[in-house]
Amino acid sequence: MKVCMTAGGTGGHIFPAIALADACKAASMDVFFIGNKDKMEALEVPKAGYPFFQIENKGYRGNLINKVNILLGQFKAIHSAAKIIQKQRPDIVVAFGGYVTVPVVIAAKLYKINVLIHEQNAVAGKANIFLSRFVDGIAVSYPQSLTQFKHHDVRLIGNPRATVAHLTVSQGELIESMGLDANKKTALIVMGSQGSESVNEVLKKFVLNASSSPHQFIIATGRKHYLEFIENLNVPNNVIVTDFVDQIKLLSKIDLLIARGGATSAAEMLAKGVASIIIPSPFVPNNHQLHNARALSEKGASVCIEEKDLTDLLLLETANEILNNDQLRLTMSTAAKTLGLPDALDKMVDWVKEIV
């Protein structure tokens, strides 16, 4: 069986697709990807070891002239995708969101190839909403997404990254290697792989007050912000500031995660049952991180603090409240695991086989 994956633009789309690709490969399927030539997928997919075929496609934004040019570009992108589909002859296409998936799915349907789409967020993206009328099945990650698609076959599957997180062995020695006390409650603060300049400004003040806490904190600033962050900053002994951490390897060894509300981060924390404070980015399409955060906080798995309300004292007070209360963390952890759906990969692989 041959599977074509398509996903684009952000890690929230790309990494779940790669996770499914790995599972399909383990099930003796051949996998290749189609994506944008100048976006994140062009780097991450080849790094993961999969054939990557490039097309050029842009989102539908800007003034009228730009939109007309982009619409014309869609026909070119569909033609490019169709040539790849015709040559590679996949048995199925699985799309994980991002505007690059639109011409790929349309090209696949021109050749009468079955298509599944996967929605990672609590509020469906525009590309997936548009494509839903053409596809054969839709997988979602949150219960509230089930009613957002007018389709006969929408299933609550979960995010494939949840399975990856569930199976990843956390490296507790990383905490001790950072010079922290393995017996103290630990919070990890990470605002995505790139960090957040606006949240980092709050975190600088947070660091100055953190010495009053009996707990310890690991702050990942993002590589491009690190040197500016630590300049002239007096860091107390219970705080470690670093440019980057591999979040998934620490999740079972920390007591609290303070993070953005992206789909991948949410899937990982739920699978590991980690109590969390989510600070959703206000700079994302459809404000989807806020919807993700609310979906978790409404079930008691997380506390949501919108960036417009964020202060250093509020963050420290909320973190201390959770870290001080073992029963509260247990309740949040239980709620997270209930939402985690760690068997998402198995369900997706089974559906791929079923639909072919």
Image (cartoon, rainbow, N blue to C red):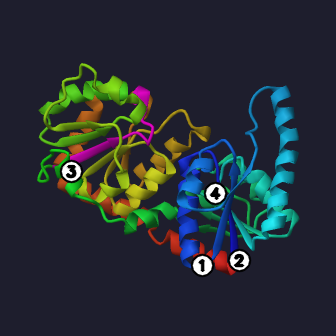
The CA span between labels 4 and 2 is 17 Å
- Kindly state the secondary structure of the residue where label 2 is placed: helix
Distance Cα–Cα, label 1 vs label 2: 9 Å
Give the camera-side residue of 344 and 197: 197
In the rendered view, would you say 292 is above or below 314?
Answer: below
- Looking at the rendered structure, the kind of residue marked 1 is Asp
Please tell me which of labels 1 and 4 falls first in the chain: 4
Badge 3 crowding class, 10 Å Cα cut-off, few under 14, some 14 to 19, many 20 or more, is some
Q: Amino acid at mark 4?
A: Phe
Q: Which mark is residue 175?
A: 3
| 28 is within the stretch colored magenta | no
Q: Residues within 10 Å of mark 2 (few under 14, many from 20)?
A: few
| Residues at marks 1 and 3, CA–CA distance in whole angstroms | 38 Å
The residue carrying mark 4 is 96
Q: Which residue is the extreme one toward the top?
A: 232
Q: Which residues are magenta?
A: 185-199
Q: Label 4 crowding class (10 Å Cα cut-off): few <14, some 14-19, many 20+?
A: many
Residue 19 location (% of width, % of height): 53, 64
* Mark in front: 1 vs 3: 3
Residue at image location 38% in from the left, 69% down from the top: 167
Q: Which residue is mark 2?
A: 355
How packed is label 1: few (under 14 Cα within 10 Å), some, or many (20 or more)? few
Distance CA(mark 3)–CA(mark 4): 34 Å
Asked if residue 193 is among those painted magenta in the image, a careful observer would answer: yes
| Rendered image quadrant of residue 53 | bottom right
Earlier-in-chain disc, 3 versus 2: 3
Residue position marked by numbered label 1 in the rendering: 350
312 relative position to 290: left or right: left
Question: In what element is the residue under mark 4?
Answer: loop
Q: Amino acid at mark 3?
A: Ile
**Amino acid at dot 2:** Ile
